[in-house]
Amino acid sequence: MYCNSGVTLLVEKWFETRYVRGLLQVRGHTYRYIGYIPGDTWVLKYHNLHEDINEYIHRVRDPVSGRVESEILTRSQFPVMSEVLDELEIISEGQ
């Protein structure tokens, strides 16, 4: 996704499907969001790409100092895409 200010959000999602009593169910399995500011490296990451797919990683890189903060989230804490976009907007303000 490309935002008006040039900020970019890479979005990758993999889904699993199954039929239960004739109804199709779709569940997100693997996620990756990576936010970039023009002329910089990444500033925001959310993903569950490690060995344990129930371990959701949230990383924020300060675009000025380069300092990285990281935390592990549960599946229920993992944000929806609009929340990721909101956070990326806050990080990129003034850049």
Image (cartoon, rainbow, N blue to C red):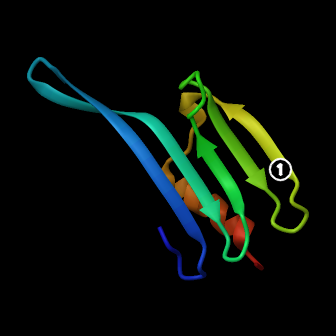
Outermost residue to the left: 22
Q: Nearer the viewer, residue 23 or 49?
A: 49
Image coordinates of residue 2 in percent, x first then y, are 50, 73
Outermost residue to the right: 65
The amino acid at mark 1 is Val
Image coordinates of residue 19 in percent, x first then y, are 16, 23
Q: Is residue 22 left or right of residue 40?
A: left
Is residue 81 positioned above or below 26 on the image? below
Outermost residue to the top: 21
* Residue 87 lies in quadrant: bottom right
Q: Is residue 14 left or right of residue 85?
A: left
Image coordinates of residue 30 in percent, x first then y, are 46, 35
Q: How many labels does the image show?
A: 1
Q: Mark 1 sits on what residue?
A: 68
* Residue 29 lies in quadrant: top left
- How dense is the environment of label 1, judged by Cα within 10 Å: few (below 14), some, or many (20 and up)? few
* Residue 8 lies in quadrant: bottom right
Q: In this view, does 79 lie to the left or right of 29?
A: right
Is residue 59 positioned above or below 50 on the image? below
Q: Residue at x 53, y 75 (%)?
A: 3
Q: Residue at x 60, y 35 (%)?
A: 77
Quadrant (top left/top right/bottom left/bottom right) for the C terminus: bottom right
Q: Residue at x 73, y 65 (%)?
A: 91
Q: Which residue is drawn at 72% across and 46% down?
A: 59
Secondary structure category for the residue under label 1 = strand
Outermost residue to the bottom: 4
Q: Nearer the viewer, residue 24 or 42?
A: 42
Q: In this view, does 35 lie to the left or right of 11?
A: right
Is residue 49 positioned above or below 13 on the image? above
Is residue 22 positioned above or below 88 on the image? above
